[in-house]
Image (cartoon, grey):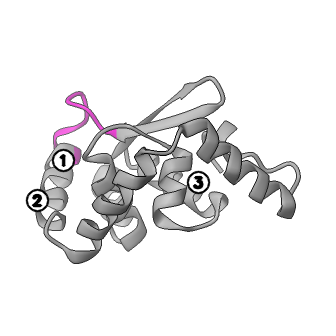
Amino acid sequence: MFDLMAVTKAMADETRVRILAALEGGELCVCQLTELVALSPSTVSKHLFLLSSARLIEGRKQGRWIYYRLAGTNAAKPVQDALKWLLENARERPRIQEDRKRLESILAIDTSELCGKQTKTTRKHAPSDNQCARSSP
């Protein structure tokens, strides 16, 4: 029952649905997702933590950056089914289509430049907060 409740809770938020839809195109850095949804790094981190806890996404660290992707074929069948249903129903939504266009321009920016810019902005508010180097809240 945990899987069902965790998955439904994780999918019951517009920002998390937007993140899942963005990841349908492939793996993305936390900084790219933060730029896409235009929220603070700590807020995006919390969303990623909930999606990861529900096993809807998987993360990996590469150097200073954390990259996320949709759960793979090794995910539990209910997770795979939920992702399939969600993505099929989200694709044609105007907000998701806007995000796809915006993501194209975000992907054109060098990751270290994008993450460096976010780190500088974040440091103005909290010197010890470096989202690009963190995997969870």
The crowd level at tag 2 (other Cα within 10 Å; few <14, some 14-19, many 20+) is few
Q: Which amino acid does label 3 sit on?
A: Ser
Quarter placement of the N terminus: bottom left
**106 or 79, which lies in front?**
106
Mark 2 and mark 1: Cα distance apart in space? 15 Å
Which residue in the structure is indicated by mark 1? 78
Residue 106 seen anywhere in this rendered image of the structure: yes
Please give the name of the residue rendered at 28% of the width and 56% of the height, measured from the top-left corner. Answer: 21
Q: Where is residue 63 in the image (x, y as percent from the top left)?
A: 63, 23
Does the rendering let one see residue 1?
A: no
Instruction: Decide whether the magenta segment is chiefly helix, strand or loop.
Output: loop
Using a 10 Å C-alpha cutoff, classify the residue at mark 3 as few (fewer than 14 neighbours), some (14 to 19) or many (20 or more).
many
Answer whether labels 2 and 1 touch (C-beta < 8 Å): no
Mark 2 against mark 1, which lies toward the viewer?
Answer: 2
Query: Which residue is tagged 3?
Result: 45
The tag earlier along the polypeptide, 3 or 1, is 3
Q: Which of marks 2 and 3 is nearer the N terminus?
A: 3
Q: Residue at x 16, y 40 (%)?
A: 77
Q: Which residue is drawn at 53% across and 58% down?
A: 35
First of labels 2, 1 by sequence position: 1
**Mark 3–mark 1 contact, CB under 8 Å?**
no
Read off the magenta span: 70-79
**Mark number, residue 88:** 2
Please provide percent x and percent y for residue 76: 23, 37
